[in-house]
């Protein structure tokens, strides 16, 4: 089973306790309809396992089949540069697939971002190296589609369904607590 090759660092977008026994990494594409459905499952699981789960989102835009995925990823990173990555992450998934430039500008305004800075980031592709780095880390980890999940560094190969994923997270949590004893 492939393992996560790129370690989690300060460059990642992380939500949840730093010392959580379970780290869930998603390689996702904002335009992917399967990622759109997974968003709701993962939101639910984050709430359910809030004290025991750290969630990491990494970009894996499949630009050849989802032409608006890369601009959406750039918009998320531009929002992140202003401290609102997770807010933009949520807006993008909740408004999928509305990622035309005017949509992205409206989302930025809705988040009270500095719109001039946001536009400049998009026009200059300032965050493209970060997105490409995520993508290449995914390739090295065997990612070939989205969403692709890793639980404590090991690839989760099942469907992104609440009960199945909850069991996998709970098993990883129990394993970590057993190791700590």
Image (cartoon, rainbow, N blue to C red):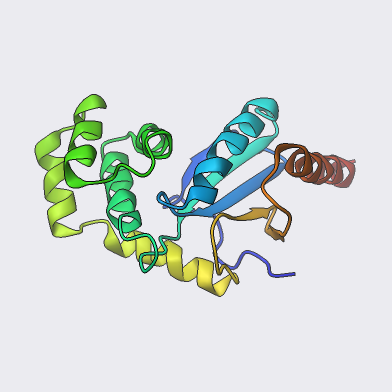
- Which quadrant of the figure has residue 62? bottom left
Whether 40 is drawn above or below 74: the answer is: above
Taking depth in this image into account, of 169 and 148 the one nearest to the observer is 148
| Residue at point 66%, 37% (across, down) | 53
Taking depth in this image into account, of 49 and 43 the one nearest to the observer is 43
Whether 97 is drawn above or below 59: the answer is: above
Q: Is residue 91 left or right of residue 161?
A: left
- Which quadrant of the figure has residue 135? bottom left
Q: Is residue 174 left or right of residue 163?
A: right
| Residue at point 11%, 49% (across, down) | 120
Q: Quadrant of the N terminus?
A: bottom right
Question: Looking at the image, can residue 136 be seen?
Answer: yes
| Residue at point 57%, 67% (across, down) | 143
Q: Is residue 43 left or right of residue 28?
A: right
| Residue at point 67%, 58% (across, down) | 153
The spot of residue 146 in percent (x, y) is 54, 58
The spot of residue 105 in percent (x, y) is 18, 37
The spot of residue 32 in percent (x, y) is 46, 53
Question: Looking at the image, can residue 18 be seen?
Answer: no
- Which quadrant of the figure has residue 115? top left
Tally the marks: 0
Q: Quadrant of the C terminus?
A: top right
Whether 165 is drawn above or below 58: the answer is: above
The spot of residue 148 in percent (x, y) is 59, 57
């Amino acid at each position: 089973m492939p393992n996560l090759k790129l370690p989690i660092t300060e460059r990642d977008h992380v939500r949840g306790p730093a010392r959580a026994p379970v780290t869930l990494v998603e390689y996702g594409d904002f335009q992917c309809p399967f990622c759109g459905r997974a968003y709701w499952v993962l939101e639910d699981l984050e709430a359910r396992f809030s004290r025991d789960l750290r969630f990491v989102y990494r970009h894996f835009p499949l630009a050849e089949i989802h032409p608006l995925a890369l601009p959406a990823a750039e918009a998320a990173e531009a929002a992140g540069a202003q401290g609102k990555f997770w807010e933009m992450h949520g807006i993008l998934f909740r408004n999928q697939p509305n990622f035309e430039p005017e949509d992205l500008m409206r989302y930025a305004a809705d988040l009270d971002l500095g719109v001039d800075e946001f536009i400049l980031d998009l026009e200059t592709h300032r965050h493209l190296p970060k997105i490409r780095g995520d993508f290449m880390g995914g390739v090295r980890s065997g990612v070939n589609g989205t969403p692709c999940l890793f639980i404590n560094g090991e690839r989760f190969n099942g469907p992104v369904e609440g009960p199945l994923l909850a069991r996998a997270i709970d098993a990883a949590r129990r394993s970590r607590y057993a190791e700590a004893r």
